[in-house]
Image (spheres, rainbow, N blue to C red):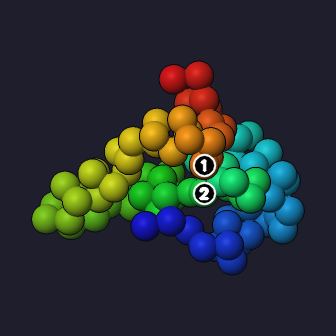
Amino acid sequence: MFLNAEEIIRLTGRKRPTAQCRFLSREGYRFRVNAFGEPIVLEAEVRRRFGIEEAPASRAKASKEADLDWRAMVKRGMVRRRGPDQNA
């Protein structure tokens, strides 16, 4: 569902969370920042960015996962809004 720490390092080429967030923002990835200041990226976001299509049967499930509602977590201070949709 989410990229793990090693996958985020591989994607961004950066080890520090602040540098990872800068890269993700600059490249237009949608992500959130957790309470540790680390970026949280959905696997579906990476698949979308690389144009990888899934089988039609799993597309509905992936769509639901990609449309997670972060508002409750943001409201409780569990994550901060970051990325290109931060003003949405």
Quadrant placement of the N terminus: bottom left
Compared with 64, 84 (above or below) is: above
Q: Is residue 81 visible?
A: yes
Task: Residue type at mark 1: give it.
Answer: Met
Q: Earlier in the sequence, mark 1 or mark 2?
A: 2
The residue closer to the viewer here, 40 or 56, is: 40
Q: Position of residue 84 (x, y in %)?
A: 61, 32
The residue positioned farthest toward the bottom in the image shown: 6
Q: Nearer the viewer, mark 1 or mark 2?
A: 1
Q: Residues within 10 Å of mark 1 (few under 14, many from 20)?
A: some
Q: Is residue 30 visible?
A: no
Which residue position holds label 1? 78
Q: Say which residue appears at 38% left-offset and 47% top-offset.
A: 68
Which quadrant of the view contains residue 30? Answer: top right
Which residue position holds label 2? 40
Which quadrant of the view contains residue 13? Answer: bottom right
Query: In the image, 19: left or right of 25?
Result: right
The residue closer to the viewer here, 72 or 65, is: 72
Disc marking residue 41: none
Compared with 86, 62 (above or below) is: below
- The secondary structure type at the circle numbered 1 is loop
